[in-house]
Image (cartoon, helix red, strand yellow):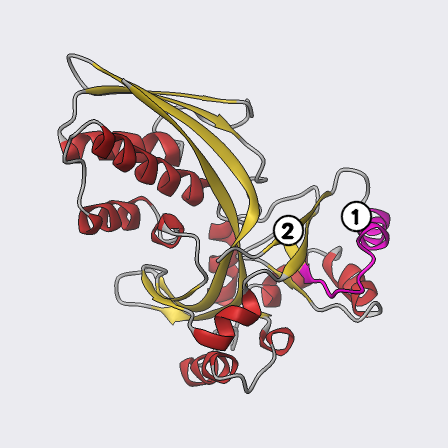
């Protein structure tokens, strides 16, 4: 029997360009993604059993605790592929808002895969190879492979093609402080993709997206100038709450961006930012039910 506690970080998209629909039906993306030091925690233990089994509990009663939860599905997939006859128990302490564009479910799934891999190694079992883990993560969700380590990545394809961020670009990004904020409502990812697909001229050009990423990577473009999210084209016209707050934050010389398909957003903080004041600005615009959290980019 063994047990482990793992951190499951949220992510932000600092650049998210939707380029169009691929032949396989998925949308093609070009994105700069980073994980932050805010997230969920999972407590996982196992014991030998006659057959593989998974039990999941969560402190958020609105979330499923069966195969509809990616953490459960990840454990189930790991046991099936490894052939381990373990009874795995997972306790999920949820802090990342769901329906937020912060990758909470995908992060949970990859945290489970990483934890079970470590537990199998400690038990002297083979578990899954790195390649098998990556394959399973990609099957669970497009964002899942990103979370198998906690370094910023350039993401392409449907999200499964990842490349590291190197040199001065990585140094500029890692440790950057942010203010995360989410309104009381969520945005449906299927709705966001469907609406974007139906909006003429909403897809970005691949050449433009790659030029922007290359310019930032080489130091020719500041991070604040790189910020871009294709989904703002459809989210802002539908949800009137975004634009007034973004305008107010710009009055404090802060650049903001929606993360993923929303509805969470973030502002890049500076050393002179008055975080308490900014939190008040967010609450004044979006009310007391807003989620606000200061965070830092991992790397």
**Within-10-Å neighbours for mark 2: few <14, some 14–19, many 20+:** many
Q: Is residue 283 magenta?
A: yes
Residue in view at x 42 percent, y 85 percent: 207
Is 187 positioned to the left or the right of 109 in the image?
right
Element assignment for label 2:
strand
Q: Residue at x 86, y 53 (%)?
A: 277
Residue that appears at 50% across and 85% down: 215
Q: What's the residue at 46%, 62% (across, down)?
A: 152
As drawn, 243 above or below 276: below
Q: Quadrant of the N terminus?
A: top left
Residue 220 x, y percent position in the rendering:
55, 87
Comparing 82 with 63, the one in front is 82
Real-space CA distance between mark 1 and mark 2, rounded to the nearest whole angstrom: 20 Å
| Dominant secondary structure, magenta | helix
Residue 52: quadrant of the picture: top left
Tell me the number on the disc at residue 295.
2
The residue at which mark 1 appears reads as: 286
Of residues 291 and 199, the one nearer the viewer is 291
Which segment is the magenta one? Answer: 267-286
Q: Is residue 212 above or below residue 53?
A: below
Pinpoint residue 299: horizontal percent, then vertical percent: 48, 58
Q: Dot 1: within a 10 Å radius of its alpha carbon, few (fewer than 14), some, or many (20 or more) residues?
A: some
Q: Is residue 11 left or right of residue 296?
A: left
| Residue 85 coordinates in the image, percent (x, y) | 17, 21
Q: Quadrant of residue 158?
A: bottom left
Q: Are marks 1 and 2 in contact (CB under 8 Å)?
A: no
Residue 154 versus residue 92 in the image, above or below: below
Q: Nearer the viewer, mark 1 or mark 2?
A: 2
Q: Is residue 260 visible?
A: yes
Q: Is residue 101 something that shows in the picture?
A: no
Which element is circle 1 on? Answer: helix
Is residue 238 shown in magenta?
no
């Amino acid at each position: 029997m063994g047990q482990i506690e793992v951190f499951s970080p949220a992510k932000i998209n600092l650049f998210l360009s939707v380029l169009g629909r691929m032949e396989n039906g998925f949308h093609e993306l070009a994105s700069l993604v980073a994980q932050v030091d805010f997230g969920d925690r999972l407590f996982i233990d196992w014991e030998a059993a006659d057959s593989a089994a998974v039990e999941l509990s969560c402190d958020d009663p609105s979330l499923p605790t069966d195969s509809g939860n990616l953490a459960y599905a990840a454990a189930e997939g790991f046991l099936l592929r490894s052939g381990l006859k373990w009874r795995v128990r997972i306790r999920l302490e949820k802090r990342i808002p769901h329906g937020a564009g912060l990758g909470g479910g995908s992060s949970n799934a990859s945290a489970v895969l990483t934890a079970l891999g470590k537990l199998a190694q400690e038990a002297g079992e083979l578990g899954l190879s790195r390649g098998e883990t990556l394959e399973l993560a990609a099957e669970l969700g497009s964002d899942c492979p990103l979370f198998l380590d906690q370094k910023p990545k350039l993401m392409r394809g449907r999200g499964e093609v990842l490349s590291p961020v190197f040199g001065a670009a990585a140094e500029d990004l890692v440790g950057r402080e942010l203010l995360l904020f989410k309104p009381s409502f969520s945005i449906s990812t299927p709705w966001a993709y469907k609406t974007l697909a139906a909006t003429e001229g909403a897809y970005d050009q691949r050449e433009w997206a790659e030029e922007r990423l290359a310019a930032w990577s080489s130091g020719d473009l500041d991070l604040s100038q790189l910020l871009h999210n294709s989904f703002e084209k459809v989210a802002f016209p539908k949800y009137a709450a975004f634009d007034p707050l973004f305008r107010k934050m710009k009055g404090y010389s802060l650049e903001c961006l929606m993360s993923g398909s929303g509805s969470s957003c973030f502002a890049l903080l500076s050393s002179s930012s008055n975080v308490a004041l900014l939190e008040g600005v967010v609450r004044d615009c979006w009310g007391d039910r807003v989620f606000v959290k200061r965070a830092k980019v991992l790397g």
